[in-house]
Image (tube, rainbow, N blue to C red):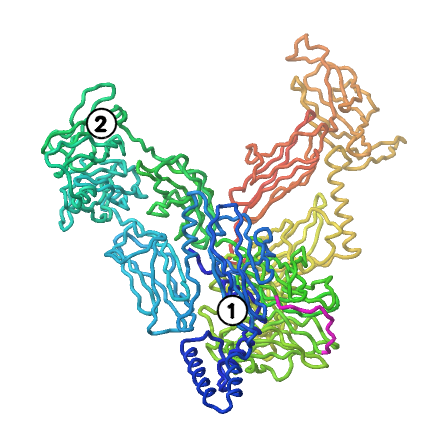
Amino acid sequence: MLHNSPLSHEFQSGLSDTEEARAKESAGYLARRDLFASGVESEHIEHKSHRTVMRESAERISLSKRVSGDPSPIYENEEYHKRLNEDSLMHIPEFVIKPRSHTVWEKQCVRLHCTISGWPEPRVVWYKNNVSIDPMATPEKYKVESSYSVHSLEINKCDFDDTAQYRVSAMNSKGETSAFASVVVKSSLLHFHKIKLNLMCVCTAAPCLEYGVTFETHLVEKFGVSFGREGETLSFGCSVIIYPSLQRFQPEIEWYRDDKLLVPSKWVQMHWSGDRATLTLSHLNKEDEGLYTLRVITKSGFETHSAYVFVRDADAEVAGAPGAPLDVHSLDANKDYVIVTWKQPAVDGGSPILGYFVDRCEVGMTHWAQCNDTPVKFARFPVTGLVEGRSYVFRVRAVNKAGMSHPSRVSEPVAAMDPADRLTLHLSGGKKGVVPGRPCDLSVIEATKNYVVLSWKPPGEKGHEGVMYYVEKCVSGTDSWQRVNTEIPVKSPRFALFDLAEGKSYRFRVRCCNSAGVGEPSEPTEATTVGDKLDIPSAPGRVVPTRNTDTSVVVSWEASRDAKELVGYYIESNIAGSNTWEPCNNKPVKGTRFICHGLTTDESYVFRVRAVNAAGISEFSQESEAIKVKAAITSPTPPYGITVLECVRDSMVLAWKQPTFIGGADITGYFVDYREVIGGVPGKWHEANIKSVSERAYRVSKLKENMLYQFQVRAANMAGVGIPSLPSETFKCEEWTIAVPGPPHDLQVQEVRKDSLVLLWKPPVYQGRDPVNGYYIDIKEAEADFEMWRGVNEKATDKTFIKVCMHDLKMGESYVFRVRAQNKAGVGKASDSTEPVEAVTKPGTAEIVVNVDDDGVISLNFECSNLTADSKFVWSKNYVEMTEPERMTLETKGSKSKAIFKTPSEEDLGIYSCFVTHTDGASASYTLSEESETELMFSKLFRPSSPVIPLKTELAVELLEKGRVRFWLQAEKISANGKAEYVFNDNVVHQGEMNFDKNTGIIEMFMESLGKEDEGTFTFQLQDGKATNQSSLVLIGDVFKQLQKESEFQKKEWIRKQGPHFVEYLGYEVTPECCVRLNKMTFLTYILTYKSQTYVTLEHKSSLKSLGYICSNSQQYIVWVKIINFLHTHSIYLHLNIVLAASNSSTPLKIQSTEEGIRLYTFVTFAAFVSSADTGNRLILMFFIDRARVAGGLPDVVTIQEGKCLNLTCNIWGEPIPEVTWLKNEREMVSNDHYILKFESGKFASFTITSVSTSDSGKYSILVKNKYGTESGDFTVSVFIPDEEPGKKK
């Protein structure tokens, strides 16, 4: 059905506001002049009523009499023609030839044409379903031509959407007239239902008049989507407003369910009270589920409203029992036989349905008889044994292993009577005592594994008394015929055969009989195999959900392939992750698209679908992707109110108003089009901007001076670009030279209350000869005349906002506003007026609350109760948005937003407002001024009374090993709730390793090194309840450079000491014997392992021998060795004392330089545990300069707060590049999302724990290894949980 668009009223006339106003004004003037010559003027434009026609007729008769009886007939005759035919050349448009309706095939073209007369020359507009057609917007679809009063509309490549009612409207200053034509586009049966739906719209009668009155119908308080349960009563309806209201006129009320007209019954009751239409569904059943439509029909057309009604299953009598079947119908009724059909329920109770039982009951009786002994799975069953002439109703019950369902709603009554017999009663003739002939057209009309149904036609020769029938069968391949109904012949030409062997093939034939005897058999049927010919449909294809509203989702799917006699589909939904499936519909839907209502907003759902036919229910389709229930985003409606703000020789600045509906998403920009108007004929549209503009004002350049132009604007959001606005008025491109300013623009109304509101605007683009120095605001009631504008402010305001208070407003009244700018030359043109604003405080309206806590922190707090998912809090000072405020901190949590002053002062005085987007205008403001009560709040801050935390030491700095820098201070006493923050150059810094020992009051922060960016002021801020304190240390200039230089030196020294190095530098002394003795030798110990477990220990000795000299009288061998350290560019001398345990003799110690390192070796003979084969073994002492080492960077202990991120980095030495392994509590670790282990460039190993927890506490090690050696570094991680009040910022 056609639903009225919210924009349809904007397109009904096809004229702009100014053109329509001029047309009405001229038409009103002519009507007053022609119809009321006596001087009585009418202020409204109306069609001639019956009373007006009678009055003109009486005047005509009166004037005729006066003309015939007066001595001055010429004068009176002129007066007569003057009054009745004053403008003989001007007349209302008339259709000489009206457009005719067409029915065409899809993809064909159709042309509607008409001939119209009228003077002045009428303007012709074409409409589709009351929406004007713009051929410039879709030139490939529509083509409009006008030539010599012949007007045509051509529609190219028609499709289904072109099936509609088309109207051509002709209008001039004398009036308007219209003609209608329908276009129907025909296609395949797949879309037949769509054509039928459009035809219902096409059949709407053209607007006509009842006593000169056009009725306007409005539906209010509309019913929405409803939910009920079987057995309940549900009522819903709409209030109907018809203007004008005539007591003797009542509209026609119609109700539809799934496009089928409803009639009153025991299940459906309709009520019309004169202003409200109500539909009541007593004792709901699943048959009542569907799309309900109310249609209110008047003489001028009709209005409709639709909504879906869902019916849930009643609670089963037995837990786990299936739902009741539905839509029970009786088909093919005869004397003793009827076929009962039904639809399977959507709910099976958790176990498969085993079958169905069919019950029958005679009309007027209460006893139900079961028709089948065993349940049937096929949703169709032939019921036999009926008594001819009696009426029956039927019901069906489903059964599974848990039990029986509730019975379905009973079918409509059906009489056991053969239609052919009814016809025979009215026929004469027939021969008594004639043996009937052969039956004809015998066929098997239905075959399942449970039964076979035969159908035939009576013979031509059957006598006056009528006939009965015997049915015979035989197995295919044999000629052994067996009579099925041996005892009683059947009366109907239908028969159901039971107890046939499944899988076997049979043939059937029928004989007629009467009192004269049994006739010849009919021709036998073809062989029929007993079994289900109708298969259960296959599972539907891919299921795709899309967003619709906050409580519904549109589900579409691919139809089941090769499905026969498809009844429809059942859809089920499931909250993602819950595995609890609920039916979305309890009545099968025939399409492949369905709107699932009643869903929870912001929950994620998945869907699946099953197909249904008489044979059963298919398997489930694959589950859809999860979708979050949220309103769908659509393109915005057109902007409106296009005005010119400034005009120069070749450009114009336009402004417009925001669309009334933005489509559920923020407007991302606007597109402006323009066209020339030459001789009153508009040209083609051209794009003014390729890239969208975000403001509602735009300068259109490259225009021609003194040319006329029209403009249109389109709005865009993330869903796309909306339809264009109506064309603007015609504007002339000529430079403004007026001295006064142009109109302000972009008027907005905020903070609407019953006694006040705030009006905002933007300054005019055109300033005039002098700058703007003030504004005047005007107000009037929304329905008041133009003359009722009055000023709000006597003195011009220099601001771009004003608060309109109670003395200008009346609660409940609607108002409009406009603004005028002034300069030294005077007051300029007024802006466009705002939309009507009702002075009322909406429920749930909140105000900004000022709060000062015990610590003296001032905050502005605002709460909004009707937030949407896209809502944002926008804070402003003096109505200028604060995007990144320097003096305030903005915090938003849920439906609350807070603006916190950092360091309040007189600079913060002003008007603070908060506006919430995507709401119905939720906003509020608060004024901070010297005269306000907040003066006391500020005085608290200027004279703080909070206690101070005493300090033992102020903030100090010292250097540690590896060049690390330690900042620290100590408080005298602090509680477990105390906290500290590190501030650098007035910015809170969360980096760096900071420890806070609340037992000792020591707060320390470590930095690995100092860079140029670290020069500045270091501050520790402490807070313990209300007590606060802080201490700062300034490191700038020479002080910072000296500390930085010392830190770098300490770091280099630590790196140097990781290899062979000087502990004390080489010195000397002169002995009394005039010898020079070297002393202060390097002290260094190495422990090396030889393959025979001999240990070589290198120790410091005070005595010294020459290089390579071996002292043979001792088993202590002293050697003086020079070693080149390849890692560091300096040389060192080592004094080595080699102790060879358990050795008998050895050769002199030798030194050899190799690629691997410096080799010291000797040949040793062992006295014990070494066999003779081992004599001559060589002891090798190697110095591996490039062995793997951990060069530093790891602390011994790391204390960190839970939830923080820990990152440690150390340097790795060695050639070849060592292998790096990390251990936790002696177990090897692997890198993952929680533990991130990296080794980069062969030199830097990093260890990161994301979001530290208490389980991360323990001992950690890094193990590095290459072919020259192995080394490890250990550190301990301790995680603590701060003992702070919940909700406070950590």
* Residue, disc 1: 176
Query: Magenta segment: does it hold 898?
Result: no
Say whether disc 1 or disc 2 marks the residue closer to the N-terminus.
Answer: 1
Element class at badge 2? strand
Side (left or right) of 570 relative to 1177: left
Toward the top, the furthest residue is: 1172
Q: Is residue 1077 above or below residue 956?
A: above
| CB within 8 Å, label 1 to label 2 | no
- What residue does disc 2 label? 508
Give the quadrant of the C terminus.
bottom right
Mark 2, other Cα within 10 Å: few <14 / some 14–19 / many ≥20: many
In front: 97, or 215?
A: 97
* Percent of width and height locating residue 1258: 55, 40
**Mark 2: which amino acid?**
Phe
> Over which residues does the magenta segment extend?
728-739
Q: Magenta span has 732?
A: yes
Q: CA distance from mark 1 to mark 2?
A: 73 Å
Instruction: Say which quarter of the image contains residue 917.
Output: bottom right
Secondary structure that dominates the magenta span: loop
- The three-letter amino acid code for the residue at tag 1 is Glu
The answer to whether residue 782 shows anywhere in this view is yes
Q: Work out whether 949 lies above or below 1147.
A: below
Classify mark 1: helix, strand or loop: strand
